[in-house]
Image: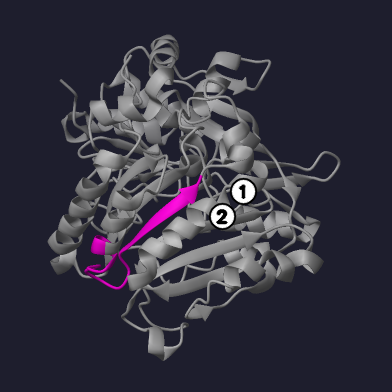
């Protein structure tokens, strides 16, 4: 039975406060309700205490406090987790948002990043040097959560997942000890954190390999939703044969409004968002077969890499209602395409959407057992999200999302990318790690035998 924070003697909290450079936020404090907000406005949890860490010493003190007092511990980086797994009710939240630093090393093109940084901050720091780290499609996402879960995004086909570019991490373990993990030091733990989520400790610093990316050629192409089956069939045959320099994720979506032209507003589309990292002089040639499919709208062109990373930030601010469901897929056969047409034609709110991210190119050439991320052979990481600003629409977007998932799941590979999952239970976690689950359990037993870090897509020791 876990102890709640309010059951603890105030002297214990005061003793913790005396060890911190950061601050403690309690339910009686004025900033409490602001502090407990996360990216997903559907999450309404009431932690007993936040420890707002500013350095590793704060993290160590907070971990020791949580363990010694038998309280539930959650760890929050960027706060983007769909299921709100950076928070817990009545327990302790170890908040890393104050641990921010970025150092770019141009001698070997590596980047050292704090556990509380957001990806837009990393892009800002690396871009002047003509460098980028592969990472998602939304710049407000936290570095920690996205990395530990895998990291699928615009650069996956060219440079692999984010975890494929992780060289080293500094971690605070469940016993309060501090370790640096890489291919030589604690290699078992280094394997586990590259896709195993926050199960094994708290990462306070990441070291990434960056790559030469300054300007990309990309943007959205849209077709009427009625063409979904045709475009998906063409896309499936096209994208996996395309050069690694070209990435594009396909979506069913509604255009909510500006900055898109008015004739597109509030209508459903099948869309593809492209990102080409190759020779800009060859971009028009690369895009010829794409534009030959006669999209009703296209806005592709040359832009700085941070621009494509932040393309959707304005449409998806923090605080919207979100409900997520996900699966991996190996094919886009006729039955799958029919389901996408059916549910893409009944999208309930302008921001709700479905994405399929291609897992090919560099991302598919990493061994299926080289990291916990088990679905290197899948063709797509799929996600359906019901999104709306109004809490009154929460049931509507949730039902559409679940129904869409139910329609597709029989054709899936069985598991889901953990960063796209809600709090869905042990069987879904096992399915997502597949053949790597047993090894992950062994490492969890070694480093966190009491399961202190359990508020996550939990691998039980």
Residue sitting at 50 percent across and 22 percent down? 192
- Tell which of 361 and 353 is nearer to you: 361
The local crowd at label 2, few if under 14, some if 14 to 19, many if 20 or more residues have their Cα within 10 Å, is few
x, y percent for residue 375: 46, 32
Is 346 contained in the magenta span? yes
Task: Look at the image and give the residue range highlighted in magenta.
Answer: 342-358
Is any part of residue 412 visible from this angle?
yes
Q: Quadrant of residue 303?
A: bottom right
Is 391 contained in the magenta span? no
Above or below, 330 against 400 in this view is: above
The local crowd at label 1, few if under 14, some if 14 to 19, many if 20 or more residues have their Cα within 10 Å, is few
Q: How far apart are the alpha carbons under marks 2 and 1? A: 6 Å
Please report contact status of discs 2 and 1: CB closer than 8 Å, yes or no. yes
- Tell which of 279 and 165 is nearer to you: 279
Above or below, 66 against 85 in this view is: above
Quadrant of the snapshot with the N terminus: top left
Left or right of residue 42: residue 155: right
Residue sitting at 39 percent across and 49 percent down? 332
Q: Quadrant of residue 409?
A: top left
Residue at mark 2: 238
Residue sitting at 53 percent across and 45 percent down? 143
Residue at mark 1: 241
Q: Secondary structure at mark 2?
A: helix
- Tell which of 338 and 18 is nearer to you: 338
């Amino acid at each position: 039975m876990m102890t709640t924070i309010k059951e603890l003697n105030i002297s214990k909290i005061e003793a913790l406060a005396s060890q911190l450079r950061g601050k403690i936020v309690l339910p009686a404090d004025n900033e409490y309700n602001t502090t407990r907000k996360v990216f997903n406005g559907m999450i309404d949890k009431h932690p007993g205490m936040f420890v707002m860490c500013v350095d590793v010493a704060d993290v160590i003190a907070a971990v020791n406090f949580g363990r010694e007092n038998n309280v539930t511990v959650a760890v929050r980086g960027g706060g983007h987790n769909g299921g709100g797994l950076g928070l817990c009710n009545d327990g302790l939240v170890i908040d890393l948002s104050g641990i921010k630093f970025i150092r770019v090393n141009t001698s070997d093109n590596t980047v050292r990043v704090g556990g509380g940084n957001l990806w837009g901050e990393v892009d800002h720091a690396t871009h002047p040097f003509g460098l980028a780290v592969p990472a998602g499609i939304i710049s407000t996402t936290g570095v920690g959560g996205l990395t530990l879960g895998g990291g699928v995004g615009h650069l996956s086909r060219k440079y692999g997942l984010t975890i494929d570019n992780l060289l080293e991490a500094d971690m605070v373990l469940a016993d309060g000890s501090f370790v640096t993990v890489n291919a030589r030091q604690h290699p078992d733990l280094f394997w586990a954190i590259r896709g195993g989520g926050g199960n094994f400790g708290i990462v306070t610093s990441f070291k990434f390999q960056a790559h030469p990316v300054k300007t990309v050629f990309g943007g959205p192409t849209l077709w009427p939703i009625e063409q979904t089956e045709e475009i998906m069939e063409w896309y499936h045959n096209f994208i996996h044969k395309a050069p690694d320099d070209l990435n594009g994720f396909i979506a069913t979506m509604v255009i909510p409004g500006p900055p898109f032209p008015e004739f597109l507003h509030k209508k459903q589309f099948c869309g593809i968002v492209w990102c080409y990292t190759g020779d800009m002089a060859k971009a028009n040639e690369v895009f010829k077969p794409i534009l030959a499919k006669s999209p009703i709208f296209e806005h592709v062109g040359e832009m700085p890499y941070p621009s494509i990373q932040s393309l959707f930030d304005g449409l998806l601010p923090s605080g919207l209602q979100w409900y997520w469901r996900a699966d991996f897929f190996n094919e886009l056969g006729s039955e799958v395409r029919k389901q996408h047409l059916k549910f893409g034609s009944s999208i309930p709110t302008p921001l709700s959407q479905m994405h399929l991210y291609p897992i090919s190119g560099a991302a598919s050439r990493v061994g299926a057992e080289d990291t916990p991320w088990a679905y290197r052979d899948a063709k797509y990481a799929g996600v359906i999200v019901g999104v709306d600003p109004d809490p009154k629409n929460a049931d509507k977007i949730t039902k559409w999302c679940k129904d869409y998932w139910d329609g597709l799941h029989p054709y899936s590979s069985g598991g889901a990318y953990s960063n796209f999952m809600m709090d869905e239970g042990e069987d879904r976690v096992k399915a997502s790690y597949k053949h790597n689950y047993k090894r992950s359990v062994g490492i969890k037993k070694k480093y966190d035998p009491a399961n202190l870090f359990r508020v996550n897509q939990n691998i039980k020791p």
